[in-house]
Amino acid sequence: MTPARHALRIALLTAFAAALLGRLAATTQVMYADGLRFVAAARAVDRGDWSTSVVRSVDHPAYPVAIAAARRTLGIADSPAGWQAAAQVVSVLAGAALVAPLYLVALELFGPTAGWLACLLTFLVPTTGHVLGDVLSEGVFLLAWTWGVWCALRFFRAGAVRWLVPTIACAGLAYLTRPEGLLLPVALATTLMLTPLAASWRLPRVAWLKAAALIVLGPMLVVGPYVAIKGGIGTKPAVARLLGTAPKSAATAVERERPLDADQSAWTAFAMAWRGMFRAVQGAVTTPLLILAAIGLIRRTPAIDAGRSRGRLFVATYGSMWMLALVRLYATGGYCTPRHALILALPLIAAAAHGLARIADRVAASLPDDSARLARGLTCAAGVALVAGVWGPRSLAPINAESVGYRQAGSWLAAHSAADARVLDLKGWAMYYADRPGYSFADYTASGADPGLRYVVAHDAFLIGEWPYCQAIRDRVGGRPPIASFPDRPKKGVSRVHVFDLTPDVARAGDSATH
């Protein structure tokens, strides 16, 4: 296939991804909770506070810097809604740009049919669009990561050391976006060490030695200064737990899927961690595509050269490493979500695309030559249509729609409270959209000693839950009825959010501002 034909496919697929992600961003009223941190860091960048945004921030700076640059460049208002819009612009652009490296990686691993199928299937899976259309760093991270993977595949295929320069550069950008970017050079080094073990994997001795030197020195030069500034690979609690430099999450920590049983055995914890990892991968890929991925991996292309063997070894290496990291993430933190499994999901979806292509080849093989091409195309189209039919409604559903009450509560606070009124809002959304100071989950315990605390915002689960922070909410509310509730009436699948006014003499019933 000619380069022009590949370019046309990439352009059409990019337009499709941009339309999908743009629609999701346009219908998103409430960003994912982690987005609040990214926007706070972007605001610090915008005002020149590099200590807050780079040195002391738990998140790495590339995405916040991109948000601040987008807002300035596009002239977006300096407001909560404006910052969310700027962050979504960055995410959508990065997500749409991800098509090119996705296509090239699938092309390198499995061939041209898998290239376009992989891109379509990736964006038809609900998790992908909902992560890339939200205010999250995954879009920028996966863009840098996937370009780095493709450059690494080109190195392993041809043995040309020059391909390691862009690989390490992309790994550096990925790391400056999320700490797991360091997995790329680690997987490179591990794969390089494995290549002498089999004749079909071996590289020329000179190329191997040059590559080894570059893989060791390159990351030190690219990310070393930032690691030195931060004082470590990363300051996220999850990173510290993964590395064993911090203890496991508390038994009732908010990030845990469920409280930790006091008498849980090591074997039970191990089994739960593997099950949590599998559920995350299953959510990111979907069960039908996992089955197709198994077909694609078992029924490989018969003729495969040494270069592609090395490339597949590299992908298997980083995939295995990340799978084990997810297991440890669950074991130490009590959680593992489809969002965390995207590094694994992307090559698995490419394998699923290859599996669908192999099924199409088998169907075409039973037909005359003049009908085989049409049958192959119709089989692939039917597979994509089936995935779209099953998962399309979820893929197009608004992001975080279940939390829209928090944005409505924020709008109410903006209209009915003083600019300095302090708010207790564990989620942080209402405070953000109201642009009011106060306390979120990170510092909610301090709210008990603040006589100036005026409002509490909480959804139903926080008012009845058994967790310590739920009791703190109930203590602050003290049995008061809400002064406002959103949405006005309960809606299926939407959390009802209540605003409580802690002023002693405020009217408690019949308040005309209740809704």
Image (cartoon, grey):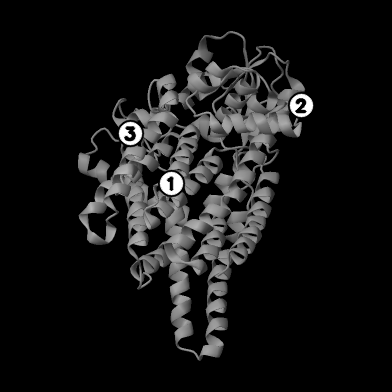
Badge 1: how crowded within 10 Å, few (<14), some, or many (20+)? some
Q: Left or right of 298: which side holds 69?
A: right
Name the residue at 48% across, 41% down: 170
Residue 324 visible in this rendered orientation of the protein: yes
Q: Which of marks 2 and 3 is nearer the N terminus?
A: 3
Which image quarter: residue 311?
bottom left
Against 33, is 291 above or below? below
Q: Left or right of 377: which side holds 295?
A: left
Against 19, is 131 above or below? above
Q: Indicate which label's residue lies in the foreground, 1 or 3.
A: 1
Q: Left or right of 372: which side holds 326?
A: left
- Amino acid residing under circle 1: Arg
- Amino acid residing under circle 2: Ala
- Reading the image, the residue beneath label 2 is 513
- Secondary structure type for disc 2: loop
- Reading the image, the residue beneath label 1 is 162
- Secondary structure type for disc 1: helix
Identify the disc placed on residue 242.
3
Of 223 and 359, nearer the camera is: 223
- Amino acid residing under circle 3: Leu
Residue lying farthest bottom?
368
Q: Earlier in the sequence, mark 2 or mark 1?
A: 1
Residue 252 visible in this rendered orientation of the protein: no
